[in-house]
Amino acid sequence: MITTISFANGLDPDAMFLSNFENYIETLILFLIFNSLLIKREYFTIERMIKINTFFHLLLFVNTGLVLIEMFTPYADYFLELYVKNDAEGYRTATNSMGRYMGVFNLPMESGMAYSMGLLTWLYNFTQKKNKKIILEFLLFLAILIGGIASVSKVFLMVGAILFVAVFFMIGSIRNKLIFLFVGIFSLSTLVPLLTGGWRGFRILESQFIKITTNFSIDNITAGRLGSGSGIYSWVLNQDILALIFGNGFTQAGLLHLDSEYMQILYQGGVISLCLYLAILIKLFIRCVSIDSKFYKERILMFSILLLGAITAIGGPMIFMNRVRIFFFIQLFFIYKLTHMVFVRIKTKETAINEPSDGSVITV
């Protein structure tokens, strides 16, 4: 829809156009690859899902290592430009001067979403693993906490952390709760020196907490994105009727602060594309609810990740222009395949060509 509007509005297929197009088509390609290469039912097991999650946690562990190098050593400038896109524009320098460190991520929102997913999937792994390596689990959990807190992201602190606690009480066993209580207290006590040791980001956390608790409002919670002071919504909504219905295509000219994926879709594809976008989210939630009760933990995990994504989209791109979306969709795809591919037993009275006569199992 948005690609069609782009050509209808006569936009030149320049580098910016191709970049935007790639952001949209990449998600579709990801699903096509999954469906073609991972079509076998036996591939989708809880054990393999745990391994995929662990790989994600190890990547976050490495990223946290980069964050610590940024925070405590003078060597960040030697490698920062190798993996941070916006440093030349001054944005990354500005966030670092505020005490917000994100490693390979460009935006606090992006980092917050990644580490929030890390928390949720770490918890799932922790409750599913039969033989836990406590030291490894502790190190991964500590790295996820450090990385999430260091970014000073509202997505991590106000969405991911709250979802983590809620999911923990829903899927954690008594034994896991006792183990986690010890791991959590030990982790937080380890982090206290980092938080109070002159770190500028701690002052931001403190000021945000005071602002929200003293004046609890949508403005303060969303940093102005949903408040009366936000110019994003008025700018997008105050367009002519055709642009509002059909959109402007792959262009962001004049839209200086694109801090909401909902508004991005509305601006680029109009009301029609926004309705399609919301229909995708609604269908995903319906699929989540339809998961069988025997996959209770997977259903809770999928619902929490979907909710995390839907809330994150308020403050920035989540599905189309966010590098974390790769793991976001891997999670949704894997959980769906694990819980919705079923075996149907076919019973036949007579043998026919290419038909089983013994009631063998057919995958659908």
Image (cartoon, rainbow, N blue to C red):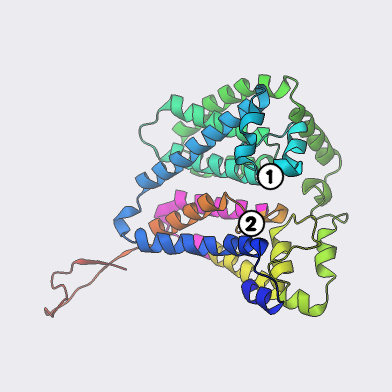
Task: Please provide percent x and percent y for residue 350.
Answer: 12, 80
Looking at the picture, tell me which residue is in the foreground, 58 or 221. Answer: 58
Q: Crowdedness of circle 1 by 10 Å Cα count: few (<14), some, many (20+)?
A: many
Q: Tag 1's secondary structure?
A: loop
Q: Tag 2's secondary structure?
A: helix
Q: Amino acid at mark 2?
A: Ala
In the image: residue 206, left or right of residue 45 = right
Q: Which mark is residue 331?
A: none
Residue 166 visible somewhere in the drawing:
no
Judge whether residue 303 is colored magenta.
Answer: yes
Looking at the picture, tell me which residue is in the foreground, 177 or 140. Answer: 140
Residue bearing mark 2: 310
The residue at the point 62 percent across, 72 percent down is 3
In the picture, residue 11 is in which quadrant? bottom right
149 is higher (above) or lower (below) than 328: above
Magenta extent: 286-312
**Number of callouts:** 2
Task: Please provide percent x and percent y for residue 347.
Answer: 19, 73
Q: Earlier in the sequence, mark 2 or mark 1?
A: 1
Task: Please provide percent x and percent y for residue 266.
Answer: 72, 68
The residue at the point 67 percent across, 32 percent down is 150
In the image: residue 267, left or right of residue 239 = left
Task: Please provide percent x and percent y for residue 2.
Answer: 65, 72
Residue bearing mark 1: 107
The residue at the point 29 percent across, 55 percent down is 42
Quarter of the figure with the C terminus: bottom left
Quarter of the figure with the N terminus: bottom right
